[in-house]
Structures are given as C-alpha cells and as structure tokens.
Image: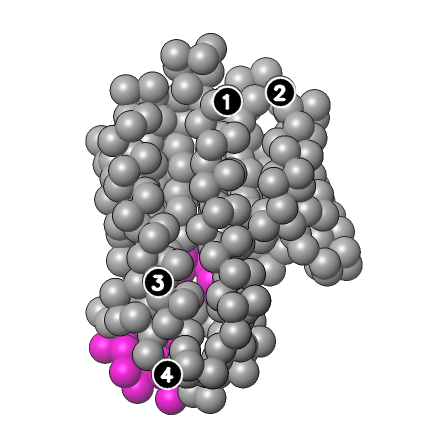
Amino acid sequence: MTGMQKTVLVTGGARGIGRATCLAAARAGYRVAFNYLADDAAAAGLVAEIESGGGTAMALRADVALEADVDRLFAAIDARFGRLDALVNNAGITGPAGRFMDTDRATIDSVLRVNVTGMMDCCRAAAARMATGRGGVGGAIVNVSSGAATTGAPFTYVWYGAAKAAVEAFTRGLAAEVAAEGIRVNCISPGVTATDIHRSSGRNQGLEELARTIPVGRAATPEEIAGPILYLMSDTASYIVGSVLRVGGGR
C-alpha cells in the first residue's frame, strides 16, 4: 500500500450496481468506502470479499437522505483514508410503483431526498475535498441516473423519472462549475439491470418481459454497469466532462 493509493466512495454499495462497482474498484486498486442503509450482513460480506482479495474496504451504515449521516460518512473517510479521489452516487430508491395520482407526498419526498438532495449533498462534500482551489488534487464524480429520466416512467414511478432527470441536469451544471478545479463530473444511465431495486417497488413487469423490449434481448448484469462507471472514473476518460453515458443494451 502506498500513500498515493486512490480512494473511492460508492453510495448504496452493499448490493446491486453499487456492490459490483465496489468490487470492480477494488480490483482496479482503489481503497473502497461505501455506505449502506440496513443490511449489515451484506455490507460485512462485501468488506470480507474485498479484503480476502487483498483490497481495502470500509462500510458505514448511513442514510444519504440525512445530511448528518452524509457528514458522518465523509468524516469517516477523512479519518480512515485521508483522501477521496472518486465518488459514485449510486444510492437510489423508487418508492412503490403506481400512478402519480395515487401516490402520496411522503413517497415523493423520500425519493427526492435520496436520489436528488442526498446526491447533491454527497457531491458538495466530495467536491470540497477534491477541488484544487481548496487544496485537493482533483477527482471524478459519477452520478447514476436511469432511462426513466428520458421516458418519464409513466404508470410506474414518474416521480423517480423526474428525480433522475434532475440528476442529469445537475450533472451537467456541476460539471461546468468544477471542471477548472480538477474535478470531472459525469453521469451513467443504466438500462434494465438484474438488481432488486425494481422488484422491491412492486413493479408488475418481470425481467423476462422487459428483456423483450431491449435490442440485445436481455437485462444487464450489475457488472456490465460497473465497468462503464470505472471507465468514467479513470484517467482514460480525462476529457469526458458533463456527459450522460447510456448503457442500455440499445434501449
């Protein structure tokens, strides 16, 4: 281990795309920090898997919807690693699937707090540490959006689509603000991926049914989304700023 080893924070890292991103980052030589909401066993298992492969990982139970939890999360990274080189804003919730007219304000508020406000809080905290004008060495931020930002997700969760459209607009604006500070901000828009997020929403369509709408004929694996995230974090993507990369199997 060297003092120059890079550190990445992945929000919502214990499962799905976040988990695959943590594993890919560890294989690429990053020290990995991630937060998770509730599943202690999944988090401990991921830390053990990374460490058994010779990597370094830290898990923190924290809710990005709560500003105090975000502050605590970044303070823990400061204390353990002393630097932050990359942030992947992966934490996200959809709320129960349904029509907008039948959805209450509490559901919408909770989705916006995680997907939009929490993501912004994490970006602010990361940028403050990365910005060359504040003593940082630069870095990369990758925000995770969704095809729902484009389709609007009618009859499923239009509030989630609206939240992800906000993520994409925010990515473009923040990218322009902090590019001169050595920070690259980009966004990835995954297509249908074999994870729990939509299943837990009660969405009626199964992966098999959705697969018929995708030109390549199947859902993505989490690893197929993690790869492009690692690319956007990497020096290979050094001239990519404010972009939304669609990884949707042609959909």
Q: Residues within 10 Å of mark 4 (few under 14, many from 20)?
A: few
What is the spatial separation of the Cα atoms under label 3 and label 1, in whole angstroms? 29 Å
Identified at 75% across, 51% down, the residue is: 44
Identified at 33% across, 44% down, the residue is: 170
Q: Secondary structure at mark 1?
A: helix
What is the spatial separation of the Cα atoms under label 3 and label 4, in whole angstroms? 13 Å
Disc 2: which residue: 82
Residue 175 lies, in percent from the top left, at 29, 34
> Counting residues from the N terminus, which is met first, the one under dot 3 or under dot 4?
4
* Residue 221 lies within the magenta run: yes
**Whether residue 164 is situated above or below residue 196 in the rendered picture:** above
**The residue stretch that appears in magenta:** 206-226
Q: Of the numbered discs in the image, which one, if any, rests on residue 129?
A: 1
Circle 1: residue type: Arg
Q: Secondary structure at mark 2?
A: loop
Residue 5 lies, in percent from the top left, at 55, 24
> Counting residues from the N terminus, which is met first, the one under dot 4 or under dot 1?
1
